[in-house]
Amino acid sequence: MNYRHGFHAGNFADVFKHAALIGLLDALQAKPAALCYFDTHAGRARYDLHGEQARKTQEHAVGIQRLLGATSLPHALQRYVDLVHAFQPADTAGIAVYPGSPLIAQRLLRADDRAIVCEWHEEEAAALRDALEGDTRFAIHHRDGYAALKALLPPAQKRGLVLVDPPFEAQGAEFEQVEEALANAWTRWPNATYAVWYPIKLRETIAPFHRWLRDHAERADVLVAELLLHPDNSGLRLNGCGLAIVNPPWQFDDTLGQWLPAVQDLLAQSRFGSSRIEWLKRS
Ligand SMILES: C[S@@+](CC[C@H](N)C(=O)[O-])C[C@H]1O[C@@H](n2cnc3c(N)ncnc32)[C@H](O)[C@@H]1O
């Protein structure tokens, strides 16, 4: 476990993932019934962009920072930017703090909603606990998120969202773990929405996961959204990333379509960027 999200906080992948996360929670909260948010790989929740890790990579400079200077953003992106702004200390120019997925969810969850968040790395888990301290809606687990999914589903709430956001230190092996976890999870909690984030380097390494989803997500629709800053033909760098969404909220493809092209333009690093929204499976 060498991965530390602090090196990447607020980068293009976080912008994409967190704007989508807000959209997913908004859509699920269109119904009044309480929901459960389950974050299998939560991270430390609060990232210091002036800290050593973020200063070393400066990935946020070509991520969230690009959106801060933009005018007339699509509603979903403005909502994301406003949410990030809400975490900034009063005396800070620009952004000093980046909120990870648990803090974003915490802002959005209603009084009756609940959350289960898991983080396996000891220091990150301790920071996660500090960040969420006192919020009784949250159950915080220092444990393997895949094992937690198996042990803790289904929650009391019928509806909800599972975010699976692993570090992908070993790409093929991580997909195998994701598949095993999903296959078990959706039999226990079939009504939930599952969102799996994945990195894109070489296209052919993603294809087996998409095939698996097509073949195994019985009775569920599967929507895929991807953002590529570079062509997907080099294994040497992170060219883009995607989100596979099982049981997406109604018309979520349209929701994504309202902001994904704008994010692609804002985060472009060359003229070879692209984005796509595609149904892998639709009943
Ligand atoms: C990509 S980061 C998560 C970022 C977070 N979801 C966000 O959007 O702000 C992945 C996290 O998973 C943690 N991790 C790695 N293996 C894990 C496992 N098996 N179970 C739970 N957490 C794990 C890492 O320590 C890291 O903090």
Image (cartoon, rainbow, N blue to C red):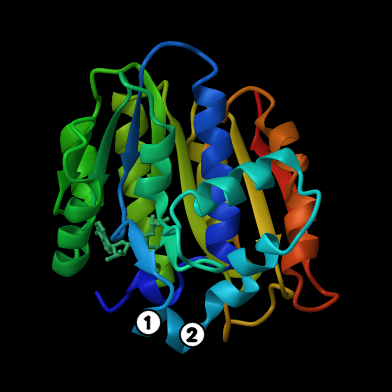
| Residue 108 percent coordinates (x, y) | 44, 33
Who is closer to the viewer here, 202 or 149?
149
Sort mark 1 into few (<14), some (14-19) or many (20+) by Cα contacts within 10 Å: some
The circle drawn on residue 174 is none
Residue labelled 2 has its Cβ within 8 Å of some atom of ligand 1: no
| Residue 23 visible at all | yes
| Residue 211 visible at all | no
Give the quadrant of residue 59.
bottom right
| Residue 105 percent coordinates (x, y) | 40, 40
Give the quadrant of residue 104.
top left
Question: What residue type is disc 1 on?
Answer: Gln
| Residue 242 percent coordinates (x, y) | 59, 56
* Residue farthest front in this picture: 91
Q: With respect to residue 259, does 121 lie above or below?
A: below
Residue labelled 1 has its Cβ within 8 Å of some atom of ligand 1: no
* Residue appearing at x 25%, y 52% in the figure: 131
The circle drawn on residue 53 is 1
Is residue 177 rendered to the left or right of residue 140? right
Callout 1–callout 2 Cβ contact below 8 Å: yes
Residue tagged 2: 57
Question: What residue type is disc 2 on?
Answer: Thr
Secondary structure under the numbered disc 2 in the rendered image: helix
* Residue appearing at x 45%, y 11% in the figure: 32
| Residue 189 percent coordinates (x, y) | 33, 25
